[in-house]
Image: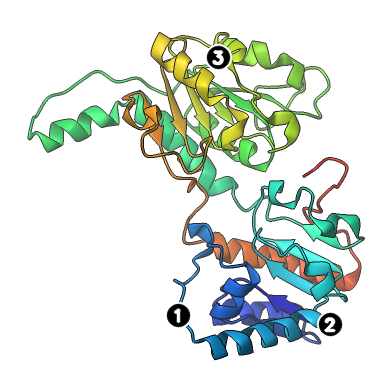
């Protein structure tokens, strides 16, 4: 079995891959090969990729030749979400692709979906860092951290009243692995947690939330919540899932937090909601469009917190991703059910 690694793993991480499949040939792509593989596209900061390096034309030709040779024999591919459209032609022996992200929108329309190649995602490794970010956003508003930053910049010793998270209601739209971790941390703060889940039937009891409801109960969740966290899957069905009608159902004191995908929220409706006071504020780790244009109004709104799609980017990301790949590799070899298999019928 030949395993091609298209991600920047450390020597120790590569050793772990080899230990998980001792009879396999593990081929890590070089830095130039990884850039050629991705068509020159960069990677999110979480993948800890090195900066691009300039190489001569003759070097590029040689690296491309070596890349093609590696892909021709690949049965397993460990890759970021950026996978070449012609991967099935270049890797005719390919049987399994492990991607590095939880989102799968980059696979839509990809020719590999027309084959029987197994696709697994990085779902599950994002919960801890993204949940920590979600709580950070809540504390940002509850404690009015911008005021403290301004006071410090102006050398002003001035106290102000704050709010507690204790006793507040958190609504989680999408109770997947990320949503569950947000719920766990929120309950540690003494918050009441209600959530919607696509597969829920009626009101369900849960060990992570006070109420788990079907998606049809979204209006109830929005009306009850002091903070609303969007952590639902990115599909065509969730495009503009939150628009003007939904934001008008929220409390005027509520904060909307989006750690899903930018297009889940109607940006024009969000601007109107913030300007007209339908909601108190918004925290956005994602945007639509993305990256957010320099001149966009959201940048200058005092009740908006923006982070550049980095809520999962921590120093442990690649470690968790490699551990997940090694576990799936063990399962692949032994014929066991694999983790995070992409369901073509669902789109995630």
In the visual, does 10 lie left or right of 116?
left
Outermost residue, front direction?
A: 57
Residue placed under numbered mark 1 in the picture: 54
Mark 2 or 3, nearer chain start: 2
For the residues bearing labels 2 and 3, Cβ distance under 8 angstroms: no
For mark 2, does the 10 Å Cα neighbourhood hold few (<14), some (14 to 19), or many (20 or more) residues?
some
Where the N terminus falls, by quadrant? Answer: bottom right
Numbered-mark total = 3
Q: Quadrant of residue 37?
A: bottom right
Within 10 Å of disc 1 (Cα), the crowding (few <14, some 14-19, many 20+) is few
Q: Which mark is residue 30?
A: none
CA distance for labels 2 and 1: 33 Å
Q: Nearer the viewer, mark 3 or mark 1?
A: 1
Where does the image place residue 58, in percent across and percent down from the top left?
56, 90
Q: Residue at x 69, y 32 (%)?
A: 207
243 up-or-down from 320: above or below = above
Q: Which quadrant of the figure contains the C terminus?
A: top right
Q: Residue at x 75, y 30 (%)?
A: 237
Residue of label 3? 247
Give yes or no for contact between labels 3 and 1 (Cβ–Cβ under 8 Å).
no
Q: Earlier in the sequence, mark 3 or mark 1?
A: 1
N-terminal of the pair, mark 2 or mark 1, is 2
Question: Are discs 2 and 1 less than 8 Å apart at CB?
Answer: no
Indicate which label's residue lies in the foreground, 2 or 3.
Answer: 3
Left or right for 306, reference 210: left
Work out how far the residue at label 3 is from the one at label 1, CA to CA, in angstroms: 49 Å
The percent position of residue 26, horizontal first and vertical second, equals 72, 83
Residue tagged 2: 1
Task: Say left or right for 144 vs 258.
Answer: left
């Amino acid at each position: 079995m030949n395993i091609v690694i298209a991600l920047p793993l450390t020597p120790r991480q590569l050793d772990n891959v080899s230990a998980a499949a001792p009879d396999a040939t593990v081929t890590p792509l070089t830095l130039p090969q990884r850039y050629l593989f991705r068509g020159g596209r960069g990677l999110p900061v979480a993948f800890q990729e090195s900066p691009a390096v300039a190489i001569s034309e003759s070097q590029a030709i040689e690296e491309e030749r070596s890349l093609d040779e590696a892909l021709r024999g690949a049965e397993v591919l460990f890759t970021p979400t950026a996978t070449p459209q012609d991967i099935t032609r270049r890797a005719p022996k390919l049987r399994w692709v492990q991607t590095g992200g939880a989102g799968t929108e980059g696979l839509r329309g990809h020719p590999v979906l027309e084959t029987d190649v197994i696709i697994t995602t990085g779902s599950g490794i994002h919960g801890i860092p993204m949940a920590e970010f979600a709580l950070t956003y809540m504390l940002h508003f509850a404690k009015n951290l911008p005021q403290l930053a301004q006071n410090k910049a102006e050398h002003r010793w001035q106290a102000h009243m704050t709010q507690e998270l204790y006793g507040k209601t958190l609504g989680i739209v999408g109770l997947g692995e990320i949503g569950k971790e947000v719920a766990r941390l929120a309950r540690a703060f003494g918050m009441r947690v209600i959530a919607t889940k696509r597969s829920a039937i009626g009101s369900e009891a849960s060990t992570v939330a006070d109420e788990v409801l079907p998606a049809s109960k979204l209006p109830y969740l929005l009306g009850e919540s002091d903070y609303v966290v969007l952590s639902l899957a990115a599909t065509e069905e969730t495009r503009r899932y939150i628009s003007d009608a939904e934001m008008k159902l929220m409390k005027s004191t509520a904060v909307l937090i989006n750690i899903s995908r930018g297009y889940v929220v109607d940006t024009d409706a969000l601007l109107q909601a913030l300007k007209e006071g339908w909601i108190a504020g918004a925290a956005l780790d994602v945007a639509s469009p993305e990256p957010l244009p320099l001149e966009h109004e959201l940048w200058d709104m005092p009740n908006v917190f923006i982070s550049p799609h980095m809520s999962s980017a921590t120093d442990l990301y690649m470690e968790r991703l490699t551990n997940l790949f090694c576990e799936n590799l063990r399962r692949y070899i032994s014929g066991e059910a694999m983790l995070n298999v992409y369901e073509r019928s669902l789109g995630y």
